[in-house]
Amino acid sequence: MQIHESAEDYLEAILMIQLEKGHVRSIDVAHKLNYSKPSVSRAVSLLRDNGYLNMARDGMLELTETGRRIAETIYERHVLLTRWLESLGVPSETAAEDACKLEHDVSEATFERLKDHILREHLAEGKQMA
């Protein structure tokens, strides 16, 4: 399934907030992504219309199964690539920014090979991917 990078960013942010706080509101997403409330409101409407999330009467956002699957994929890429770049000596903030760029553009096949390589490399060296 092909979706836009911005939608992936929103889904990932919603997942991260949910993992951190246990619940997600549009204002939480606006703060996390540093976007305006109207921008987030529009994105939430589009994500809802496309079946990636639901909004409860109280305004709480919940990822659908499809939305969660996409968010988890992007989040896994982000975490692994960030930690790998940090292990290469890239400063944490730069590593996170660069991982955010890479996570969207690398193919699934390439990411899986990278993941296998990174995990094998770190296991062989006795390192933990914190």
Image (cartoon, rainbow, N blue to C red):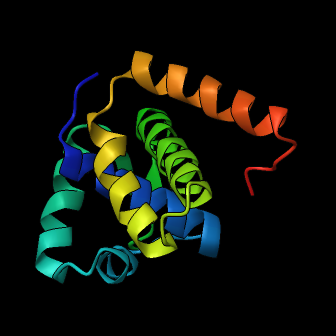
Q: How many marks?
A: 0
**In this picture, residue 75 sits left or right of residue 55:** right
Residue 115 position, x and y percent, is 58, 30
For residue 42, which quarter of the picture? Answer: bottom left
Q: In the rendered view, would you say 41 is above or below 51?
A: below
Position of the N terminus, as image quadrant, is: top left
Comparing 117 with 57, the one in front is 117
- Residue 115 visible here: yes
Q: What residue do we see at 56% from left, 65% from top?
A: 18
Residue 12 position, x and y percent, is 42, 54
Q: In the rendered view, would you say 59 is above or below 47?
A: below
Residue 33 position, x and y percent, is 30, 74
Comparing 64 with 39, the one in front is 39
**In this picture, residue 53 sits left or right of residue 77:** left
- Residue 56 visible here: no
**In this picture, residue 35 sits left or right of residue 97:** left
Comparing 75 with 44, the one in front is 75
Q: What residue do we see at 55% from left, 43% from top?
A: 76
Residue 83 position, x and y percent, is 59, 55
Q: What residue do we see at 75% from left, 39% from top?
A: 122
Q: What residue do we see at 52% from left, 19% from top?
A: 113
Farthest top residue in view: 109
Q: In the rendered view, would you say 41 is above or below 11?
A: below
Position of the C terminus, as image quadrant, is: bottom right
